[in-house]
């Protein structure tokens, strides 16, 4: 039930990787595997104490000393810009960017710029981070970008009249909208990156037991939680299992020229009709540029 494991034996010596949200869950497992493959891994995290704990764990386990903690709060565009500035001062190369961090079904809240938290972290934060790193990725080509999304995108609608969901907020709809935004971003970015030898793909890691579910009522209710664990455990992946498709898309040689696709269980899968809407993808890109002040010096 845990899905296929990535069996590739590639080493990544001299490759530089950024993994957002790498202090726990899927992100930490991805970082572990990449460190074992001798990559230089940057853990881009909000909580520096947890990040340092994860870094020490990874270094001790893999014997790879080239694992670094760097602060990057995706709910703060100022923090994202500072992270990118520091990274570029320290490195002129970036071969793999894994946009893993995310929030799910949280109570109504906002980023420091006033963007609805799930859209702001899951989409806008990674939109800004990726665009600010594109010049380094292009200079390091071949390079890859992996955006984590969810099958929840199939329920997603981009609310063009109230994208920030100020008028009618529902945690589930907000999450689905943010995951659809991940796919529309992947689609438009793939078109913009044609001919650069930089690829971008989206991955659904599966239903994974991580801290991202902490806001869901069913996981906090003392009565329903034992029943949920009893009947759902065969269908819920561990973080290590959830990392497998991400690793496949990030490093498998057969995908060197594959871009703009959606992967689930190490296979390409079809996406919802909304996720194929090129006009919507272009509209969302323009709004994202404006909300992140991407082109403002």
Image (spheres, helix red, strand yellow):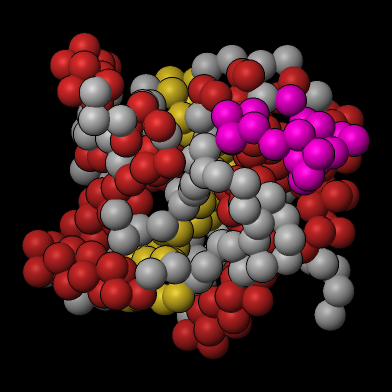
Q: What stretch is highlighted in magenta?
A: 157-173
- Image quarter hosting the N terminus: top left
Task: Name the residue rendered at 79%, 52% in the picture.
Answer: 288
Task: Name the residue rendered at 54%, 77% in the picture.
Answer: 83
Would residue 105 be seen by someone viewing this image from the given angle?
A: yes
- In the foreground, 14 or 120: 120
Quadrant for residue 153, please give it: top right
Task: Name the residue rendered at 53%, 84% in the picture.
Answer: 86
Quadrant for residue 270, please give it: top right
Residue 74 horizontal/vertical position (percent)? 56, 62
Position of residue 69 in the picture relative to residue 178 (left or right): left
- In the foreground, 166 or 160: 166
Residue 248, placed above or below residue 146: above
Q: Main secondary structure of the magenta part?
A: loop
Task: Name the residue rendered at 20%, 76% in the picture.
Answer: 65
Q: Residue furthest top?
A: 231
- Image quarter hosting the C terminus: bottom right
Residue 26 horizontal/vertical position (percent)? 32, 45
């Amino acid at each position: 039930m845990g899905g296929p494991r990535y069996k590739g034996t590639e080493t990544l010596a001299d490759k530089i990787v950024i993994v957002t949200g790498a202090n726990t869950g899927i992100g930490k497992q991805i970082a572990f595997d990449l460190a074992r493959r001798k990559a230089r891994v940057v853990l881009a995290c909000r909580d520096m104490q947890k990040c340092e704990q994860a870094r020490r764990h990874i270094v001790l386990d893999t014997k790879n000393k080239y694992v670094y903690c760097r602060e990057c709060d995706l709910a703060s565009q100022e923090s994202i810009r500072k992270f990118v500035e520091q990274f570029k001062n320290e490195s002129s190369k970036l071969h793999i960017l894994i946009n893993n961090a995310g929030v799910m079904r949280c109570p109504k809240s906002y980023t420091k710029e006033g963007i609805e938290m799930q859209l702001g972290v899951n989409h806008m934060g990674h939109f800004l981070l990726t665009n600010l790193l594109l010049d380094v990725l292009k200079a390091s080509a071949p390079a890859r970008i992996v955006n984590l999304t969810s099958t929840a995108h199939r329920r997603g609608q981009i609310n063009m009249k109230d994208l920030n969901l100020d008028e009618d907020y529902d945690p589930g709809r907000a999450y689905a909208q943010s995951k659809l935004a991940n796919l529309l971003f992947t689609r438009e970015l793939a078109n913009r990156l044609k001919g650069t030898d930089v690829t971008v793909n989206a991955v659904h890691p599966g239903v994974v037991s991580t801290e991202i579910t902490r806001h869901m009522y069913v996981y906090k209710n003392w009565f329903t939680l034992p029943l949920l664990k009893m009947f759902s455990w065969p269908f819920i992946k561990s973080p290590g299992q959830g990392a497998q498709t991400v690793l496949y898309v990030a490093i498998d040689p057969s995908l060197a020229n594959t871009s703009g696709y959606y992967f689930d269980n190490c296979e390409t899968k079809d996406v919802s009709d909304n996720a194929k809407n090129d006009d919507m993808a272009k509209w969302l890109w323009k709004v994202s540029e404006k909300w992140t002040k991407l082109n403002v010096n």
